[in-house]
Amino acid sequence: MSSGKPVTAEDLLRRTTFYKVGHHGSHNATVKALGLERMVDPRLVAAIPVVEAVAAIQGKGRAEPGSGWRMPFEELYKALQEKTKGRIVQGDGNPTVEKRAFRNNPTSAKRPVKIEHSDLFVEMTFDLS
């Protein structure tokens, strides 16, 4: 039900429970002070659409010679680890490690996020009731 009060970006960030990380987790896709730091919901989980090996190949010649792109950006990844208590799903992530993070740090005792991996995708189920 609407209270008639406008919803602000800060309101939305404060209530964010699922964050699809922008641009493969690059350094310029997630604002820290005006974005990630305002995501304070203890149920926060993140998805990073990146395959590190592909980013490294595609970035050859654009970054430091021979290095390619290093994505996700290490500082952003560390901040996400802290904010999500390790609940991160990554394009080339380790399913065993990811499942363990969700099991050891559930989003809710009564209604935790369920996570299932296949060869082609990761399915996350959120109980929104």
Image (cartoon, rainbow, N blue to C red):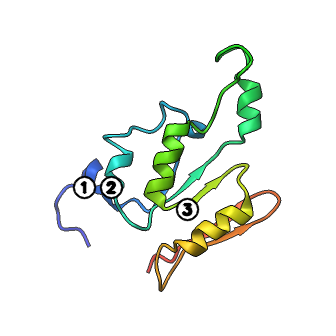
Q: Position of residue 82 (x, y in %)?
A: 46, 55
Quadrant containing the N terminus is bottom left
In percent of the image, x 16 and y 60: which residue is there? 5
Mark 3, residue position: 87
Does residue 10 appear to the left or right of 89 in the view shown?
left
Q: CA distance from mark 1 to mark 3?
A: 27 Å
Nearer to me, 9 or 111:
111
In percent of the image, x 73 and y 65: which residue is there? 96
Q: CA distance from mark 3 to mark 2?
A: 20 Å
Nearer to me, 105 or 8:
105
| Marks 3 and 2, the one that precedes in the sequence | 2
Q: What secondary structure is marked by label 3? A: loop
Q: Which numbered mark, 3 or 2, is in the foreground of this view? A: 3
Task: Identify the disc placed on residue 12.
Answer: 2
Task: Identify the disc placed on residue 7.
Answer: 1
Q: Position of residue 77 (x, y in %)?
A: 53, 45
